[in-house]
Image: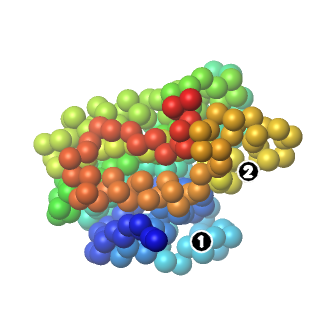
Amino acid sequence: MTNSCRFDFVDTKVLVTGGTSGIGFATASAFTDAGARVTVTGTRPSTAEYDTALERFEYHQLDMRDTEAVDRLAGSLTSLDVLVNNAGANFPDGKDEWDPDGFSAALDLNVEGAMRLTSRCRSVLATSAMSGGASVTNIVSMTAFRSTTIVPGYSAAKAALLALTRNLAVHWVGDGIRVNAVAPGLIDTPMTAPMKAFEGMVEAELSKVAIKRMGTVDEIAAAVLFLASDASAYTTGSVLAVDGGYLAL
């Protein structure tokens, strides 16, 4: 028995920041498989610098902290239907996030860049002819809901991005732009891979997950595609937790 879902994004133009690995790459791939024309961003000079196969996408080098580069990318877009703000990381430049400079760097990388790019894309998103309206999806985190003593800057940034999601959704509703968020739980990605080197860390985290396994990047991508589709045309300002029941425990 199968109960699979297929999406159709033929001729849709999609921008996924941080689309070279993990959740971003899975999301860009899923949109491409559904017929979309996808642009991804990454921090390296070219696609040759990555192990993942990026040939199916248009590529732009982008550091989300580089305001001029963000403005240039947004200004180069002549049409856009879907924006996925996925780029981000903890410990920016290896800085301690409990240090004020490290905390500020985390906010700059994880929320301020996304806010700038999204705002600069407003006019082009407003011209989208998608039946469910243009879509912005912000990738947040469980750290937006619960405390963390390791990456307080990243946590604060994701909470701010969630608040921004709700404010943009209301502010832009008249433009036909829907703004939502996806909150991944414990997902098997390059960002979480270092956890496996510490004995008992993964098991400790899984004890907080009702389904008792790590999620996959494809499960996050599916949520993003749903929020961009006309199946969610009445959904804006919402956060979809794909967390295996983490928030329920």
Q: How many marks?
A: 2
Which of pointers 2 and 1 lies earlier in the amino acid sequence?
1
Up/down of 224 relative to 242, above or below: below
Quarter of the figure with residue 80: bottom left
Given residues 240 and 57, the one toward you in this image is 240
Colour scheme in use: rainbow
Q: Is residue 91 left or right of residue 24?
A: right
Q: Which residue is mark 2?
A: 193
Q: Label 1, on which residue?
A: 47
Q: Secondary structure at mark 2?
A: helix
Is residue 190 toward the left or the right of residue 73 in the image?
right
The image quarter containing residue 181 is top left
Please rate how many residues cluster around mark 2, counting C-alpha atoms within 10 Å: few if below 14, some from 14 to 19, many from 20: few
- Amino acid type for the residue under numbered disc 2: Ala
The amino acid marked with disc number 1 is Thr
Cβ atoms under marks 2 and 1 closer than 8 Å: no
Residue 167 seen by the camera: yes
Q: Which residue is found at the position 38% from the left and 39% from the top?
A: 239
Q: Position of residue 56 (x, y in %)?
A: 49, 77
Residue drawn where x is 65% and y is 48% of the image: 213
Q: CA distance from mark 2 to mark 1?
A: 22 Å
In the rendered image, residue 57, in percent from the top left (x then y), is placed at 47, 73
Q: Along the horizontal axis of the image, is 79 left or right of 39? A: left
Q: Secondary structure beneath disc 1?
A: helix
Q: x and y percent of residue 66 in the render?
A: 50, 46
Q: Quadrant of the C terminus?
A: top right
Q: Residue at x 29, y 38 (%)?
A: 237
